[in-house]
Amino acid sequence: MSNPLLILRNFLFYLFIWITVGVIHILFLYNSASLSLKDSISDSIVFNIVYMGLGLGLWYPVKFLSIENRSSSRFALQHVLAALSTSVLWLGLSALILLVVLNPGRELDSFLMRTAGWRILIGVMLYVIIASFYYLYIFYNSYNEKLIKESELKSYAREAELKSLKYQINPHFLFNSLNSISSLTLTDPSKAREMTIKLSEYMRMTLSESEKQFHNLSEEIKNVRLYLDIEKVRFGSKFEYVEELASSSSGVMIPPMILQPLLENAIKYGVYESLEKVIIKLSCQKENNYLKISVENNYDQEAVSPSGEKIGLKNILNRLSLVYHQDNLLVVDNRDGIFKVNIFIPLGES
Amino acid sequence: MSKINTVIIDDEPLAREIVKAYLKNFPEIEIAAECDNGFQGIKAINEFKPDLIFLDVQMPKINGFEMLELLEELPVVIFTTAYDQYALKAFEANAADYLLKPFSEERFSEAISKASFFLADKKRNEETLGNVFEQMDKKKEFLERVVVKNGPRIHIIPADKISFIEAQDDYVMINTAEGRFLKQKTMKFFEDHLNPEEFIRIHRSFLVRLSEIKQIELFEKETYRVQTSGGKFLPVSKSGYSRLKEIFQ
C-alpha cells in the first residue's frame, strides 16, 4: 500500500484542508493575538506548509507501527515519541525558516517564544488527527480487501462444488463403467454386483464430500481407492496403483476432491494414452510444516496428449491458494517420462 | 452360406467381452482376432481381411477414426463408443451402425442386421465410410496430430511439429524437422483443420507454420518468398502475401 495522500484526488483534498486551516490561523493571529497582517500571514504559511509536508511523512511510521504486530503499551509509547519528535521538529524547522529566511520584526520573535508550548501541543494534536486518518484508511482498505476475498472464496467454493457435481455425471466415465458392469453381468455376475456397489458408493461419496470445506485425508484416499477400483475393472492389468502413506498423515484435514483430478489425469494421460503398463503412485508424508502429497505416473512420451491438461492443475492451484493464502502449494515435476504432481498442505491450519 | 469374419478392437477387455458374448447368437459370424489398440487393429485387419469390425473410438495413441484412415481396404464398421450425442451426431447417418455403450442385446442384433446390408453391398459401404471421415472431421476443433502410414510403419505427427505442408498432386507432403511424410489428403483439408492462429496458407501449394517463418523477402519484382527457419524457400502468392501482411503488420 502506498501513501494514500499522494493520490491526486486525495492530495487536493489534503491541500484544501490545509488552506482552510491556514486561513483560520491568519484570522486568529490577526484578530486575537493582535499581530500585524504581514506577520500573521508569514507565520501561518510557514507553520502550515511545514506540517503539511511532515503530515505526508507520517504515513511511514503509521505503516511501520501496525497494531497487530506489537504489544499495545509499546505501540502507544512509540506513537507518543513519534508525536513529540514530529512536533519539536515542526516547531524548530518553522521557527528557523521564519527567523532566518524571512527575518521578521521583534514582535513575531517574542510571540514565537511565548507560544512555543502551545505549538508543541497543537503539533501533537495534528499528529493524532493525521495518524488516525491513516489508520482509518488502512483499516478501511483491508476490510474491503477482506470482503472481496470472501466473496471470491464463496464463488469459488460454489464453482468447485459445481465442478465436482459435473464430475459425477461425466458421461464418458459413467457410461464406460456401466458398459463394464453390463459385460460382467454375463461373464461374472458377482463381480458385476460388486462394481455396481462401488460405483454407487463412489457417487454418493463425491456428492456428500463435495459439500464440506475440509475432510480427513483418509476420507479422500478412500474415495481415490474407490475411483481407481472402478477404473481397474475397466482397464484390467493396464495399470497398477501403489500407495505410500506415512501413518501420521491420515488425520490431516484437506479440501475434499483435491486429489481426484490428479488421479483422473493419471488415468486419462497415462493409462489411456499408453500401450505399456502404467504405475500410479500416491504418497503422503509430513515434511517440515507441510503435508506433502504426491501423485505420479509414468506415461508414453511419444503419445500426443489431448489438450486441456493444464486446466485441472490450475483449478487445484487456485483452490489451494484461496484456502491457504499461499500460491506455491502445487509443484509439477515432469521428466524422463514420469509425471509427478506434489501438493503441499500447510499443517496446523484447517 | 459363407462365414462372416470379424475383428473386435477395443482397449477395454470387458468391452470386448460383451461383444463376444452377444456374438454367440450369431454363429455365422466368426471372430478372427481381438485387439486392444489401433496398431494391432491395422495389423489384424491386413492379416485377416475381415468383412466386419467392431471399433472403439477412444483408444491409446491412435483412435478408431485415425486407424480407419490408415487402412487400404475398408471393412464394414460398427462403432462402439461411450461418447456423447454431439460426437455421435457427426456420424449418425454414415457408419454401418454405432453402438452407444452400454448397449442392449436387442440393439446389438439391430446393428448386425444393419451391417449385413452393407456386407451385401461393399461399394455402398466404402462410399458411406468416406462420409464418416468427412463428418468426423467436422466435429474436431483443430487437428492435434496427423497419422501417416509409410509401409509397415505408422508415424504419429503432433500438429505442433509440422513446419510446412506442400501440395503434391493428390497428396500432401508434410514437412517436419524429423522428416517428410506423404499423405493422401487435400491442402484444403489441412487449411480447414489446422489452427489458423498457427498456420497460414501462403500459396496454392503451401501452408506454413507462422513460427517457422524466418523472413519474407522480395524474390522478383512483386513476387515474394518466405524463408523458413529450416532454411527452405517457399513461394508466396499474391493473396498469400496479403494474408501475411495482415498478420505481421
Image: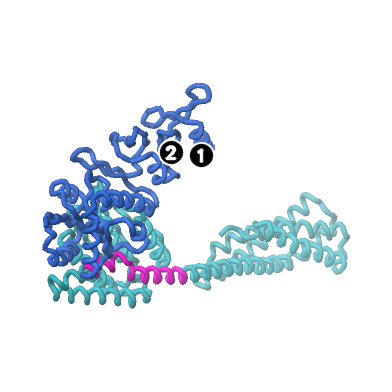
Mark identifier at residue B9? none
Crowding at mark 1 (Cα within 10 Å: few <14, some 14-19, many 20+): few
Chain letter, disc 2 residue: B
Q: Which residue is mark 1?
A: B247
Q: Colour of chain B?
A: blue
Prevalent SS, magenta region: helix
Q: Which residue is mark 2?
A: B210
Which sits earlier in the primary sequence, circle 2 or circle 1? 2
As helix, strand or loop, the secondary structure at mark 2 comes to: helix
| Quadrant of image for the C terminus of chain B | top right
Chain letter, disc 1 residue: B
- Of residue B228 and residue B77, the one placed in the foreground of this image is B77
Q: Amino acid at mark 1?
A: Ile
Where in the figure is residue A333, as x and y percent of width and height? 29, 53
Q: Is residue A217 left or right of residue B140?
A: left
Could one spot residue B75 in this view of the protein?
yes
Q: Are marks 2 and 1 in contact (CB under 8 Å)?
A: yes
Q: Colour of chain A?
A: cyan
Q: Is residue A52 magenta?
A: no
Q: Amino acid at mark 2?
A: Leu
Q: Residue at x 35, y 63 (%)?
A: B85
Q: Is residue A163 magenta?
A: yes
Q: Is residue B122 left or right of residue A11?
A: left
Where in the figure is residue A300, as x and y percent of width and height? 23, 50
Q: Quadrant of residue B149?
A: top left
In the rendered structure, which segment of residues is drawn in magenta?
A153-179
Q: Is residue B128 above or below residue A294?
A: above
- Of residue A110 and residue A181, the one placed in the foreground of this image is A181
Q: Is residue B177 left or right of residue A112?
A: left
